[in-house]
Structures are given as structure tokens and as C-alpha cells.
Image (tube, helix red, strand yellow):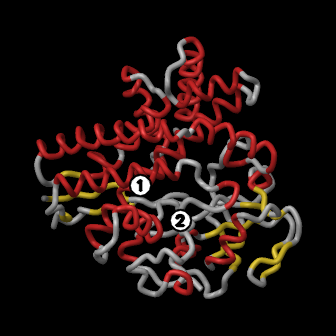
């Protein structure tokens, strides 16, 4: 069963997540008024994420239960099942070469050092969200996709606006998505005319070979952008906050520390909904065809039977956390996220070994959100 976690370090959660039942599978009401089955047990959740009877494609149908006003495009790689999903995933995975990941390390190190230089020059009392955790993944993503330096301000503004979850920001979301689609389309045309060594150029070559359509290429570019920026920026902020306020993770390697931070404080608290394409039983509960299921990655990652009540020390024998998902839709960018976090955290503490939270009120401001957790402000001293 789900273990306890420190709510003062977890931040605000939607009501259906804040007080789950002791059952492995519970019927909960979404902000839309629709009902879904919520899984909080690790074993049941892990199995559900890999169960082909639970469909991501069916969850994008207009009549399917919805968790919020914004849903992914039915053509997105995150919304597909079966052969189409496998084909696009194979194409995208081939573009994520180890050489590309190695090249990313140098980009991330250079960007991290430049941002830390700026923070040091500005002096203590810096906000690590706006000064480090948000711009770092943006720089890495721009380099990965091959966004030219001259386009960065427009690109950054559109991406940042897209993830503005204030009521005002949500109202304008459609316009920002359109801006990004237009930008991605124009960038693809430029890569077609003058290919480079970046990921988008590699994907354009795949499209030219006939393995995917133009629409799929634009959607894949946007999916990589949306998955790669917001979740990574929040994940980095949450990891820094946990290191500043949580229990010391002594005696662990950097890799073990990063994995443990991903487990205890995932920026993605819940999986995307999946809809049952036939009746099935999950954790002793019958889920009917057409009903939706979501997995609380947060609660599964804190399952005391799997990870121990204290969870302070990772154990090589225990199962993997579910922060990156599991099964066919497991996050393809996981190695890049791990790389960014390892470099970002190492560089930050090397530069500021005495790093601590600022004593002021409002040093930590949690953001309200459904699909992602994070802080909008994290003020530190050194």
C-alpha cells in the first residue's frame, strides 16, 4: 500500500490525490466532474502502465472521461497505441543516439556554468527557478532540436507562455500552441534545406525516407519540446528543494542520489489517463470497458511495501521507480533528464557548497497544477 510522505515537501495536490483511500484502486472525481479509477499501489500501477487493454488512444476520444480542459493531440506519440506508436517511437529512439547524448553533456555543462556565473554576479537572494532550473533545460532542448541562437527569444517566450497555468495563461494557450506549430513547421523547412547535426535534422531525414508523415514530424517535434521542457524544469527545482530541506542522502553516488530524488519527488505526479478497451480486473477491482484509469506515480513511488517506510537509502535490489512511467510509453528522454540533473546538481553545489534556502517568507512558492508539480519560486543564499 501507499506509504506516507512529507506533505510540507510535496506541496499542494489536487483533492483526489491529497487523500487517497487505503485501497489499491479507488474511484475518484476529476476537476472536470468525470470519474476515473486511481491506482496508488506500486505493483498494480506498474502492471496497469504496461497493460495493452488500457488504451492511451481511446483516452483522447471526445466521449472519454477527461481530467482537465487540455488534452494531448490524438496524433501525438503520447496518445498512440500499437503499431503507430511503436513505429514513431522507433524513429524517435533512433534519433536519440548515444553520440547526441554525449554532445548534450557539453552543452548542459556550458549552459549551467554560464547561468551560475550570472547568479554569482547578482549575489545571494537569487531565485533558482528563473535563474537556473528553467533556463537550463531550455538551453539543452534548443541545442538538441537545433533552434538557432537568433530564434531563442521567440522560442523561449512561446514555450514559457505555453506552460503558464494562470487562468490568463490558459485562455491564451491555444494561441501559443499555434505559434509553436508555426515555428516548428518553419524550422523543419529550414532543416530540410540546410540539415545540421541536430535531432530535428535527423527526424527530417526520416520523414524524407517515408517512414513518417509531415504531420507526425511536427507533432513529434512538439511532443519532444513539451515533454522535455516543463517536466525537466520542475523536476530540477523539486530536486534542489528536496536537497535543501530533506533528509541527507549520505553515502550515495550522484547517480543514486538523482534516482532517489526522482522517486521521492516526481514532477509528474500522475500518469496520462488510459481507457479500458475491455472489462478487466486491477488489484481486485473490476474496471469496465470505456472507464478511465490513472496511476498516481507519486503514491506508487512511496509504496512502503516496496520502498520501505523511511526510503532514505536506495537498494539495488528493489524495483525501479515509476517517475518515467513503465511499458511502451516509458519516457524516451529519461537518459537526457538524468544527465541534466546530474550535471545541474553537481555544478550547483560545487559552485555554492553552502547553498541554503533564504530565510524570507515566500522563499518557496508552490505552483498549483494537475499534470505537473513544481515550485514557481525558490530563493537561496550561499
Residue 197 x, y percent position in the rendering: 49, 25
Q: Is residue 186 left or right of residue 33?
A: left
> Which comes sooner in the sequence, label 1 or label 2?
1
Q: Which mark is residue 199?
A: none
Q: Is residue 313 above or below residue 14?
A: below
Q: Is residue 137 left or right of residue 2?
A: left
Q: Quadrant of residue 346?
A: bottom left
| Of residues 87 and 29, the one drawn nearer to the viewer in this rendering | 87
Q: Please name the residue that numbered disc 1 is placed on.
A: 234
Name the residue rendered at 54%, 28% in the picture.
179
- In x, y percent, where is residue 222? 58, 36
Q: Quadrant of residue 36?
A: bottom right
Compared to residue 230, the image places residue 265 above or below, namely below
- Residue with the mark numbered 2: 269
Q: From the viewer's perspective, is 357 left or right of 132?
A: left
Label 2 Cα neighbours within 10 Å, binned few <14 / some 14-19 / many ≥20: many
How far is the residue under mark 1 from the one under mark 2?
Answer: 12 Å
Residue at 67% in and 82% down: 24
Q: Is residue 343 above or below residue 380?
A: above
Label tally: 2
Question: Residue 165, can we see it?
Answer: no
Q: Secondary structure at mark 2?
A: loop
**Image quadrant containing the N terminus:** bottom right
* Residue 373 x, y percent position in the rendering: 46, 61
**Crowding near the residue tagged with mark 1, few <14, some 14–19, many ≥20 C-alpha atoms within 10 Å:** many
Amino acid at each position: 500500500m501507499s506509504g506516507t510522505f512529507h506533505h510540507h515537501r510535496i506541496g499542494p495536490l489536487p483533492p483526489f490525490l491529497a487523500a487517497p483511500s487505503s485501497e489499491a484502486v479507488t474511484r475518484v472525481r476529476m476537476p472536470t466532474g468525470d470519474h476515473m479509477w486511481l491506482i496508488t499501489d506500486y505493483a498494480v500501477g506498474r502492471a496497469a502502465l504496461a497493460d495493452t487493454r488500457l488504451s492511451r488512444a481511446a483516452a483522447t476520444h471526445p466521449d472519454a472521461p477527461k481530467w482537465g480542459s487540455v488534452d494531448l493531440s490524438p496524433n501525438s506519440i503520447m496518445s498512440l497505441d500499437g503499431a503507430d506508436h511503436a513505429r514513431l517511437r522507433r524513429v524517435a529512439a533512433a534519433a536519440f543516439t548515444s553520440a547526441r547524448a554525449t554532445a548534450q553533456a557539453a552543452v548542459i555543462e556550458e549552459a549551467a556554468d554560464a547561468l551560475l556565473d550570472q547568479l554569482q554576479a547578482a549575489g545571494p537572494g537569487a531565485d533558482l527557478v528563473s535563474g537556473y532550473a528553467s533556463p537550463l533545460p531550455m538551453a539543452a532542448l534548443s541545442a538538441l532540436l537545433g533552434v538557432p541562437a537568433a530564434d531563442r527569444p521567440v522560442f523561449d517566450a512561446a514555450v514559457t507562455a505555453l506552460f503558464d497555468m494562470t487562468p490568463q495563461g490558459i485562455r491564451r494557450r491555444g494561441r501559443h500552441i499555434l505559434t509553436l506549430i508555426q515555428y516548428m513547421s518553419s524550422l523543419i523547412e529550414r532543416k530540410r534545406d540546410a540539415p545540421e547535426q541536430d535531432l530535428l535534422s535527423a527526424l527530417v531525414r526520416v520523414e524524407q525516407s517515408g517512414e513518417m508523415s509531415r504531420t507526425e514530424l511536427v507533432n513529434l517535434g512538439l511532443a519532444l519540446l513539451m515533454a522535455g521542457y516543463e517536466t525537466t524544469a520542475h523536476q530540477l527545482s523539486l530536486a534542489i528543494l528536496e536537497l535543501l530541506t530533506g533528509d541527507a542522502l549520505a553515502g550515495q553516488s550522484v547517480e543514486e542520489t538523482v534516482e532517489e530524488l526522482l522517486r521521492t519527488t516526481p514532477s509528474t505526479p500522475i500518469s496520462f489517463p488510459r481507457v479500458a478497451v475491455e472489462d478487466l480486473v486491477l488489484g481486485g477491482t473490476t474496471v469496465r470497458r470505456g472507464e478511465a484509469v490513472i496511476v498516481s506515480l507519486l503514491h506508487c513511488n512511496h509504496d512502503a511495501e516496496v520502498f520501505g517506510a523511511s526510503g532514505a537509502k536506495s537498494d539495488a535490489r528493489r524495483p525501479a521507480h515509476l517517475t518515467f512511467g513503465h511499458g511502451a510509453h516509458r519516457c524516451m528522454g529519461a537518459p537526457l533528464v538524468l544527465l541534466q540533473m546530474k550535471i545541474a546538481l553537481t555544478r550547483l553545489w560545487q559552485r555554492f557548497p553552502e547553498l541554503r534556502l533564504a530565510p524570507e517568507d515566500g522563499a518557496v512558492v508552490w505552483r498549483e497544477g494537475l499534470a505537473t508539480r513544481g515550485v514557481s519560486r525558490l530563493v537561496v543564499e550561499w
